Each structure stands twice: as structure tokens, then as C-alpha cells.
Amino acid sequence: MSTSLKSQIESLLFIAGKPLAAKDIIRLVEEKISVKDAHAAVDELIKDYQDKNGGVRIIKSASEAQMVTGGDNAAVIQNFIKTETTAELTKPSIEALTIIAYRGPITKWELERIRGINCSLILRNLMLRGLVEEMADSHKKETCYTVTLDFLRYLGMADVRQLPDYESLRNNENIEKFLRGEQ
């Protein structure tokens, strides 16, 4: 088993933040591998993390693997999540949430193109708060983000179309051109 393969899979599990199927790992790594190779590499990573006895673990089901925090640190993690979900939203989070509300369902790439920065942590925090959710978009063939019913409830609205200037901002041709790379 190549060290590079294990390293790539470890990085993928870290950045994904959700379970990854073996087929996704195979598609994303740089070398040609089989399902058996993917499972073997994940098994080695699981053992490495168990031997290290650190705060991070890798867990695996029959079809997926995920990087998670160790159970020993549950109280610390719960305190962190409580702080993250009860503190006021940051300006970047409010900006991202506004874009998602007006443009959603929106892909991470589209959100990052509009904002000009990586939005992974912002999306994670908004999902932890229950303001944004992931959904599979069969038209775009990727994961998209949209606001939740909780978001609407907090604003006292029944539908995002009740947001100020919703139609003009949702269907703004300049934003469409920008996303297509025409500006």
C-alpha cells in the first residue's frame, strides 16, 4: 500500500466532513485502485489512528468511511458546538446565508465564486445551527445548499419569496453572467 494513497484518502476524509463511499474515494485519488485497495487503505488508516490514540478517529461501515472526533472528547466537542451554535453570526456567515437565501439552491462553488473565498467552515457552521441544509441537485448533479424551515421561522416568513426584492436579486442577470464567467 503506497503512503501516498493513504495520505490522499486521509486528506479526503478530513476535508469531506461527511462519510465517503469507496466509489468516491476511487474516483478522487490520483492512482488507479480497486474497491479492495480502498478498503485496505482505510483499514490501515483506522489502525494508525487507533495506535496513535489521539482525538481523531476514522470509522467505517460496509460502504463508507468518515473521520470523526474520539468519544473521549465528547464533552469538549459538545461545549464547542454549543458555543458555535449560540454565538452571534459573523458578518461572513450573514453574507453567505443571505446569498443562499436569495440564490438557493446554490452549489458551494457558486457561493464561493460570489463571495470570493472558501466557504467550507461557514457552511458547516450554518448547517450546525440548522439554518442551511444540503440537498442533492439532480439538475446540477452535485450538492447544493438551501435555507431551512428554521431559518424562515426565525425571520417570521413562510417562504423565501417574501424576502425584500427577492425576484430581482434571485434572477439578476449580472450575477448569472458573473457565474458563467462572462464578466
Image (spheres, rainbow, N blue to C red):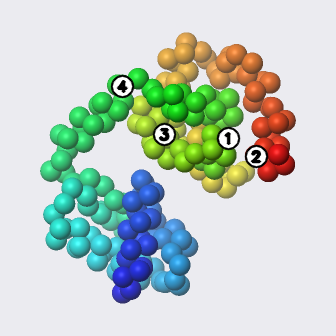
Mark 2 and mark 3 in contact? Answer it, CB < 8 Å. Answer: no
- The answer to whether marks 4 and 3 mark residues whose Cβ atoms lie closer than 8 Å is no
Which amino acid, by three-letter code, is at mark 2? Leu
Q: Are marks 1 and 2 in contact (CB under 8 Å)?
A: yes
Q: Vertical placement of 166 versus 47: above or below?
A: above
Q: Residue 53 location, x and y as percent?
A: 16, 63
Q: What is the C-alpha distance between the residues marked 2 and 3?
A: 20 Å
Q: Callout 3: 10 Å neighbours few (<14), some, many (20+)?
A: some
Q: Which of marks 2 and 3 is nearer the N terminus?
A: 3
Ranked by sequence position, the earlier of labels 4 and 1 is 4
Judge whether 129 appears above or below 30 on screen: above
The kind of residue on which mark 1 rests is: Ile
Label 1 crowd (10 A; few <14 / some 14-19 / many >=20): some
Residue 25, image x, y percentages: 48, 71
Disc assigned to residue 114: 1
What residue is drawn where x is 41% and y is 80%?
4
Residue situated in front as seen by the camera: 83 or 35:
83
- Dot 3: element: helix
- Residue 16, quarter of the rendered image: bottom left
- Pick the front one: 18 or 60: 18
Residue type indicated by callout 3: Ile
Identify the amino acid type marked 4.
Ala
Mark 2, residue position: 179
Q: How crowded is mark 4: few (under 14 residues within 10 Å), some or many (20 or more)?
A: few
Secondary structure found at label 1: helix
- Report which residue position mark 3 lands on: 122
Please identify the quarter of the rendering in which residue 19 is found.
bottom left
- Please tell me whether residue 48 is drawn above or below residue 66 in the rendered image: below
Q: Mark 4 points at which residue?
A: 87
Inter-mark Cα distance, 3 to 1: 14 Å
